[in-house]
């Protein structure tokens, strides 16, 4: 077998592969036997039909393609080893010349990993903006604790306030038609923290128990349902119950109830400690991101459009799955945001993801950073904690999928390179 290589545009190489006539004929005969085992040919048991009969039944071109598919892995592997190729995608055949009794010639093309020229990635001093604790963070934390421990008390002698919870029946119509999913019975609506259509909850404030009335709203222009986008709607409302929150007093008794504290001061000290740790985590995350961004921005790499297209398609499928999980239709989103804008965003995200990955791999190669068993174990431990599973159970579920395992391995390598960058660069929090 002989393989010659010719570099073409960007990062594409052409492989001219010559396979001796005997090897090609052997592969052809094996393909005939394999195909005969799963096709039905009248008068013959599977796997027993003569070659000429199989050729007439399925055609010689199909057999040749089967033979070439069986021969290519070895040929490609030889090309990779002999020429020290770093492939980024599976090679594809562009042409072949296959005549029994003659050498088989196959032309294939393959994409190589683009060359990355790193800028300075060690010895940097990078300033990162501090993430200070907000002035009202303590009060917000205390209010959250108090609200979590609050009780809902039914009110019958006054109209609704914006801090109440109104239990309502509602039914909506738009353009003379009932809104699909736009109705409910005894729905508890938090009037102060509603995620309904703007203006919906506000029009319920000031109403009394058992009141029945209509409210008019307009759906947002970016609403996910194309038929309702920007459309006026009317909702029939009936108030079945009004509830107000009774918030407990902030005293030592409350502090003892919510945790291992004896006094309010001890509770506040614990909250302050949490806020400080949260600030440190945020600063650490921002520092890692800023160091990595600086290193990536300094690197130079020409990324071919074919790579961007593949990554954008992959991102689009991921995006579709996330939207479907949220009950959002992809086609409706395309109509609302415009296909050109969505494709532009996907291409930009794909470009960033590809460059990040290429730079990480280049630094790992330059610094001889390699994955070890403990690195994968650490990553699986992190993922198992996030999914609420035992590490061994997660490994059973994900470890059998080669693609998923490769993705987890890449994530582990990313973490290791980021740790290296943090150890070899200085960050000043300003």
Image (cartoon, helix red, strand yellow):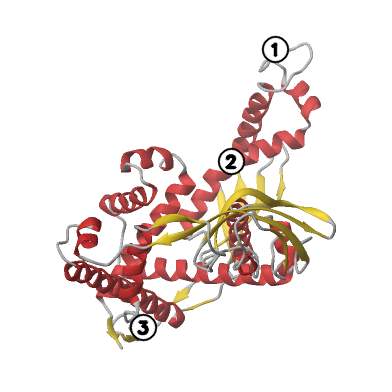
| Residue 15: quarter of image | bottom right
> Which residue has dot 2 on it?
71
> Which residue has dot 1 on it?
45
Q: Nearer the viewer, mark 2 or mark 3?
A: 3
- Label 1, secondary structure: give it: loop
For the residues labelled 2 and 3, the Cα–Cα distance comes to 44 Å
Which mark identifies residue 120?
A: 3
Q: Earlier in the sequence, mark 3 or mark 1?
A: 1
Where does residue 181 sit, x and y in percent of width and height? Answer: 69, 50
| Residue 293: quarter of image | bottom left
- Label 2, secondary structure: give it: helix
Which mark identifies residue 137?
A: none
Q: Quadrant of the C terminus?
A: bottom left
Q: Are the residues flagged by discs 2 and 3 in contact, CB closer than 8 Å?
A: no
Residue closest to the far front: 157
State the residue in front, 28 or 263. Answer: 263
Q: What residue is rendered at 17% in x and 68% in y? A: 266
Q: Is residue 288 visible?
A: yes
Left or right of 230, for residue 146: left
Q: What residue is rendered at 19% in x and 58% in y? A: 256
For the residues labelled 2 and 1, the Cα–Cα distance comes to 27 Å
Q: Is residue 8 visible?
A: no
Q: Earlier in the sequence, mark 2 or mark 1?
A: 1
Q: Are the residues flagged by discs 3 and 1 in contact, CB closer than 8 Å?
A: no
Q: Earlier in the sequence, mark 2 or mark 3?
A: 2
- Label 3, secondary structure: give it: loop
């Amino acid at each position: 077998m002989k393989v010659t290589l010719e570099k073409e545009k960007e990062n594409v190489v052409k492989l001219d592969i010559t396979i001796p006539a005997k090897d090609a004929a052997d592969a052809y005969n094996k393909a005939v036997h394999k195909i005969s085992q799963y096709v039905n040919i009248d008068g013959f048991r599977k796997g027993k039909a003569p070659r000429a009969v199989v050729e007439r039944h399925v055609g010689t071109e199909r057999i040749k393609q089967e033979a070439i598919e069986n021969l290519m892995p070895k040929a490609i592997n030889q090309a990779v080893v002999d020429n020290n190729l770093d492939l980024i995608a599976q090679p594809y055949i562009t042409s072949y010349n296959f005549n029994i009794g003659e050498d088989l010639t196959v032309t294939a093309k393959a994409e190589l990993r683009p060359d990355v020229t790193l800028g300075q990635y060690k010895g940097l001093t990078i300033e990162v903006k501090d993430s200070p604790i907000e002035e009202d963070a303590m009060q917000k934390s205390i209010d959250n604790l108090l609200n979590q421990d609050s009780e809902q008390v039914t009110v019958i002698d006054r109209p609704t306030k914006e801090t109440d919870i109104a239990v309502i029946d509602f039914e909506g119509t738009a353009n003379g038609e009932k809104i699909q999913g736009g109705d409910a019975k005894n729905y508890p609506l938090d009037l102060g923290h509603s995620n309904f259509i703007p203006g919906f909850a506000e029009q319920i404030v000031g109403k009394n128990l058992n009141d029945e009335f209509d409210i008019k709203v307009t759906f947002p222009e970016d609403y996910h349902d194309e038929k309702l986008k920007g459309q006026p709607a009317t909702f029939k409302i009936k108030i079945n119950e009004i509830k107000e929150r009774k918030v407990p007093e902030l005293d030592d008794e409350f502090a003892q109830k919510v945790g291992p504290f004896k006094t309010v001061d001890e509770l506040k000290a614990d909250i302050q400690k949490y806020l400080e740790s949260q600030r440190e985590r945020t600063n650490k995350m921002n520092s890692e991101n800023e160091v990595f961004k600086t290193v990536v921005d300094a690197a130079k790499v020409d990324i071919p459009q074919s790579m961007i297209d593949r990554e954008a398609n992959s991102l689009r499928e991921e995006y579709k799955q996330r939207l479907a999980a949220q009950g959002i239709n992809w086609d409706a989103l395309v109509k609302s945001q415009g296909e050109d804008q969505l494709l532009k965003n996907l291409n930009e995200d794909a470009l960033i993801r590809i460059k990040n990955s290429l730079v990480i791999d280049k630094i790992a190669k330059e610094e001889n950073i390699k994955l070890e068993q403990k690195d994968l174990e650490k990553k699986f431990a992190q993922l198992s904690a996030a999914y609420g599973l035992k590490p061994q159970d997660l490994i059973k579920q994900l470890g059998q999928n080669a693609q998923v395992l490769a993705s987890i391995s890449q994530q582990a390598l990313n973490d290791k390179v980021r740790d290296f960058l943090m150890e070899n660069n200085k960050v000043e929090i300003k």
